[in-house]
Amino acid sequence: MKTTILVHCPDQSGIISTVTGFIHKNQGNIVYLDQHVDKNADVFFMRTVIEFDTHFLDLEKFKTLFQEELASKYKMKWSLHTDEKLPNMAIFVSKYNHCLYDLLSRYRSGELAVEIPFILSNHNDLRYIADQFEIPFYHIPFNKEIRVQAEQQQLELLQKYNIDFIVLARYMQIVSEKLISKFPNKIINIHHSFLPAFAGAKPYHAAFKRGVKIIGATSHYVTEELDAGPIIEQDVTTVTHSHSIEDFITKGRDLEKIVLSRGVKLHIARKTMVYNNKTVIFS
Amino acid sequence: MKTTILVHCPDQSGIISTVTGFIHKNQGNIVYLDQHVDKNADVFFMRTVIEFDTHFLDLEKFKTLFQEELASKYKMKWSLHTDEKLPNMAIFVSKYNHCLYDLLSRYRSGELAVEIPFILSNHNDLRYIADQFEIPFYHIPFNKEIRVQAEQQQLELLQKYNIDFIVLARYMQIVSEKLISKFPNKIINIHHSFLPAFAGAKPYHAAFKRGVKIIGATSHYVTEELDAGPIIEQDVTTVTHSHSIEDFITKGRDLEKIVLSRGVKLHIARKTMVYNNKTVIFS
Amino acid sequence: MKTTILVHCPDQSGIISTVTGFIHKNQGNIVYLDQHVDKNADVFFMRTVIEFDTHFLDLEKFKTLFQEELASKYKMKWSLHTDEKLPNMAIFVSKYNHCLYDLLSRYRSGELAVEIPFILSNHNDLRYIADQFEIPFYHIPFNKEIRVQAEQQQLELLQKYNIDFIVLARYMQIVSEKLISKFPNKIINIHHSFLPAFAGAKPYHAAFKRGVKIIGATSHYVTEELDAGPIIEQDVTTVTHSHSIEDFITKGRDLEKIVLSRGVKLHIARKTMVYNNKTVIFS
Amino acid sequence: MKTTILVHCPDQSGIISTVTGFIHKNQGNIVYLDQHVDKNADVFFMRTVIEFDTHFLDLEKFKTLFQEELASKYKMKWSLHTDEKLPNMAIFVSKYNHCLYDLLSRYRSGELAVEIPFILSNHNDLRYIADQFEIPFYHIPFNKEIRVQAEQQQLELLQKYNIDFIVLARYMQIVSEKLISKFPNKIINIHHSFLPAFAGAKPYHAAFKRGVKIIGATSHYVTEELDAGPIIEQDVTTVTHSHSIEDFITKGRDLEKIVLSRGVKLHIARKTMVYNNKTVIFS
């Protein structure tokens, strides 16, 4: 069984050797270890992947010992993940289909180690894709007047299907604070600019007006402040004066789907940690 | 003799054939022609490079005819440049040496088709490089109290040496409106971010704080609004959580010097046109 | 009606003005013109897009005049394309689904201005995707013994559906000379390396063994020599020592689908010209 | 004092915890640790940076213990480097000046933590740059007839100045086997293509002929087989049909100097390890 442990705590001498010694003592074989110290914040981050001989492992006991012998002592925030159960990923969409098609074709190819219990949309336009891939599709319209009710419906669906994290695949609706608070650092959005440039609506139009020579896309965790959450992944492509806004949008679509899927895959692989509104990406 | 003509005017049917016919009729051989129509602004742009048989050419007469037969009719703004005389380029610097070294080594290699009559700085730190390359160096200190006098000295130098355009090679001082008005779209700055993200001071610090995964550099023409002039060239490089601010600065230096030199070379080659605070780059 | 004319011919003075004058005289408005001279081969290339007032245009007469007045004189190879009829594009696949999914989702989004009459495969694995998108799927097995018969079946299908060009979307079978000769510069392949590095089989394995820090993908026209045809588009992505061959393959898939679709779109838009086994790409 | 330890050995369970425990026990604070397992070769690689309290450290004793308690047991190849003495770097050049200018301006800026005792060339063309930067310049002509004698002169210089590693900054002469054997994985070359494409002479000409859309540069350790040594760093830039061979060369120069300097900086920082003709780069 492959087990991933993520740790962060105040930096201190000897953490690595203590943790690795502990794992070794408990019959774990460290197959990967990466570590980072944020010198400004004085915080230590570690990601380690361990192979246990399952005949000998009592996982609950291991977790208890980890908490008692290490986490308490070093004031660690930590989490442990096994590969025994696939996480449940919900996809929210609106009308653009490129990110949805991309995610579902990766899913179908076995590239994403998740279950996708449902797709949710504030419009009905993309139902045909859900049908193509035989995934349940829920149409929950959204506007100011029915806001509270719509949020309630969303939350019930997320709970019913035991959703672990949410992907906003060009979902053109602001997500409620309540939802964000229930899924902290578990909602991944794709924004169609290289943030922090062109946050908010119509970034391609703004980029065109400014005359930039590079456009980009950013996948990030959603926080209450719009387009200001921790950045997971960014990429860019060049444009010239000869490109129209429509060209920006078309070129941008390719960026969006690639950058979103990279962000999703890093999240699934437990390679992301968040601290001070920034990410540590152990790639 | 190689002659470059730049034209922009309200878009209209038949311009290309009229202009090319005119050139052909006047014994010019078009060796390059590129054109662009800004559909939003309804403006036509053209860059053409012509080889004339100099035995037959009366350049002044050609210019007169161009104005009378074409420019007046189509309401053209146009300019004509020959390769007979190298333009004079002044370099302004402060304390960082990487862009200066890069420009001067390209100059020495024959990569930049200019003369560099002098280097100007508000500090004395980089005089040694000017000495290394045997180029006159003028130290004109700058602060609020001596602002008017310093600007006057700058303008006198620029006039004395008959400067055609100015390169701000990490010149950490805001250029005066008067200077800008005397050199419209003729002052090239390098800003150490992918504008419009992180305009203003300390962009690497701001990028670090925001946790971006990509940093960039932008060369642009200087206008009165800080870091908001027409963008000539941009490039980016990836960063990770493991990079410190100092790493950003070091990686950024490589971007800055490359992006600045590309901007300078495009300007020298008359491949840039400015309209609506944006550039058309005929590369 | 938008009309695109592609021309190449021995370079000579006055071609641009003659051609543009001819178009103007025949009531055409040039909305785009780009030109290139291959100095080594002394060949002139031109792409121009013209808007005609269809009330006045007799296209057949225009073509006759173009041939008589221009093409004969300048020894032009030329072609004229209108946007009145979508070209027919056949897709050949084997077992990998990422390029197929990508092309079909673009097609469904209206990003590709083509008809896709059928998908052909030497295997049955991807029939489900054709079914998802409701496009006819033909399974034509291929091995040495049934080679002649299989080629015949392919050619009949291509003829029956009046196919204009073929996209090999990771079709892992060498295409016959006969097919190539019937579709010169009309078969687009995606090769999973930055050619000419790692031509032939298993390029990711070869790249891994060599320890490169960059992997790439190349879309190109198919010629008789394997992986040696005119390159349309290339792109790359970085890799490190920590990436396994499987990681190369996964990362490469994203390159392949993007680079193939770019090549296909350039072909559809008539932006590619081929000469001396190289492409001129008027983007 | 900052100490870097590089280790590789057959992979085995428990190495990380044993090594980190050993360092901790010997009063070292691990400020950085990265590790890699080559699954194909079953080899474990580790790079760790340690801060010792120099009051307590007996470095020679630490090394002895490391050998006895760890290296013998795990069959480690290992090396230990302190930051107390700058390494001596020799630069070999021929006639192109861009890489030399770039390295020297970085050196002058304090970006390269080395001493540069001398520059060696088979031509006299770049002596003026050595003079500009006040670094000794040795002109050692090279041709078949004086090969043995020239190699001898080179070796004497390298020995006299106690050179640690050599940078071939566009040195257009094949380095002798004897020199390579004396500086294993200590000679860094820049090749002006994305290897393995276009190894050997005139890669830009070959790239132009092949019609590639991307050109590159590669820094690598020199081995006996030409352009086939372990790759340290690669980068690329796009080209189009409109670029001539001269344009390739000019664009390529920017790649070459950046890619060479990155390779040199990784080497200086002890971030490179070589195994099976490939590099592990702990960046």
Image: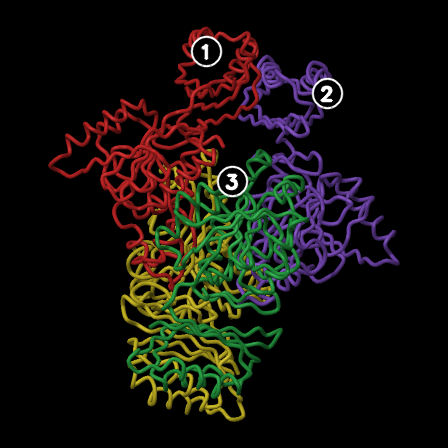
Chain colours: A red, B yellow, C green, D purple
Residue C97: percent from left, percent from top: 49, 42
Q: The residue tagged with tag 3: helix, strand or loop?
A: loop
- Determine the secondary structure under disc 1: helix
Mark 3, Cα crowd under 10 Å, few <14 / some 14-19 / many 20+, is: some
CA–CA distance between discs 2 and 1? 31 Å
Q: Quadrant of residue C10?
A: bottom right
Chain at numbered mark 2 = D
Marks 3 and 1: in contact by CB < 8 Å?
no
Q: Nearer the viewer, residue A97 or B53?
A: A97
Q: Which residue is mark 2?
A: D75
Q: Chain of mark 1?
A: A
- Marks 3 and 2, how far apart in space? 48 Å
> Which quadrant, please, contains the N terminus of chain C?
bottom left
- Amino acid found under the numbered disc labelled 2: Lys
Where in the figure is residue D215, as x and y percent of width and height?
58, 56
Q: Which residue is mark 1?
A: A70
In the picture, the quarter occupied by the C terminus of chain C is: bottom left
Residue D186: image quadrant is top right
Of tags 3 and 2, the one toward the viewer is 3
Answer with left or right where residue C157 lies relative to residue B176. Answer: right
Q: Residues within 10 Å of mark 2 (few under 14, many from 20)?
A: some
Parent chain of label 3: C
Q: Nearer the viewer, residue D264 or A172?
A: A172
Q: Secondary structure at mark 2?
A: loop
- Residue A226: mark in rendering: none
**Residue annotated with mark 3:** C125
Instruction: Give the percent coordinates (x, y) of residue C4.
Output: 42, 72
Give the number of the mark in front: 1 or 3: 3
Q: Position of residue D173 (x, y in %)?
A: 76, 55
Q: Are marks 3 and 2 in contact (CB under 8 Å)?
A: no
